[in-house]
Amino acid sequence: MIFYSNSKIKVFYYIKLGFLFLLTIAGGKEIFNSNLTLEWKDNILSVYHPSIPEGKLDTWYIEAYCRAGSTARAWEKTVIGHRTEMVSINKERNELKLRCYLNDGVIVDHLIKTEKTGISFDLIAKNPTDKMSEAHWAQPCIRVGEFTGKGAKNTDDKYAYIKSCFVFQDKNDIPDFLPTKNWKLKARYIPGQVWCPIGVNRNDVNPRPLHPVVPYKNIIGCISEDKEWLLASVWDPSQELFQGVIRCIHNDFRIGGLKPGEQKIIRGKMYLMKNDMKAFLDVYNQDFPTSKKIIKIQ
């Protein structure tokens, strides 16, 4: 006869509880997938799955690293030049390592892995130089035109896709589809729309129309053309949410500058799940339990 300690019983209990959670989180509906694979070439990160529209999803990774003070400044004065190289990809194509070299000497290592609910990103940004780095935030640009059925081959309207995109602008768990109320139309560059999270200086975001409302959740996403899939982007910490201008959406991650010798850890997730909003939010709340729920700025 085998006897188990109380600690082992607790471990087994929590494993079982977690397994039951995964089975019931969507009321019996299968929301996960196990067939995601990765590729990175010519600065495009591609995620493949046989059931999503066109079979893949592309992200310009990374589009740009940026300085603070960007909201009202010419874009070319905001961008810090960089190059990205692939360090490795495993044979299963479910784990990818990239390294970005910024022109000011900063190095950012990216570990990108597939999960049952999407793609995880674990970044380490470090400054090996003896000078302060102005690297304040960065842009992964997710191309969602084909995913939403509003790509260039379907329509000449470059902004038709935004009606399939959502943020959480109000204080509830109901997604607000674009264009939301209080939509802004004026900025240094137009069109587009930026949402600035709490704790981020509104002078340090994209020079596109800046929405007056602080998002309630750190999420921007969209629904696929066939209504079967949900895509959402989350970063911790986040600099901004952005509805872009090349049939894209952004959740741009925050670096906040780097002192000489300093390094920072940044975590992100691109959710790619069956279209079940409650199930998605349950997973999101588990993945980012400390995410702040934030209030409107009048």
Image: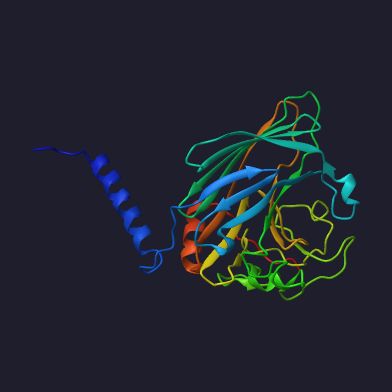
Q: Position of residue 160 (x, y in %)?
A: 72, 73
Residue furthest to the left in view is 1
Q: Nearer the viewer, residue 86 or 107?
A: 86
Q: Position of residue 2 (x, y in %)?
A: 12, 37
Q: Is residue 269 above or below residue 170?
A: above
5 vs 186, left or right, is left
44 vs 6, left or right, is right
Which of the image's four quarters has the N terminus?
top left
Which of the image's four quarters has the C terminus?
bottom right
Q: Position of residue 255 (x, y in %)?
A: 71, 42
Q: Position of residue 228 (x, y in %)?
A: 51, 69
- Find residue 241 and report its image quarter: bottom right
Point 78% across, 37% down: residue: 82
Residue furthest to the bottom in view is 181
Point 59% across, 60% down: residue: 232
Q: Is residue 4 above or below residue 119?
A: above
14 vs 49, left or right, is left
Residue furthest to the top in view is 130
- Find residue 123 and report its image quarter: top right
59 vs 192, left or right, is left
Q: Is residue 55 above or below residue 42?
A: below
Residue furthest to the front in view is 153
Point 83% across, 53% down: residue: 203
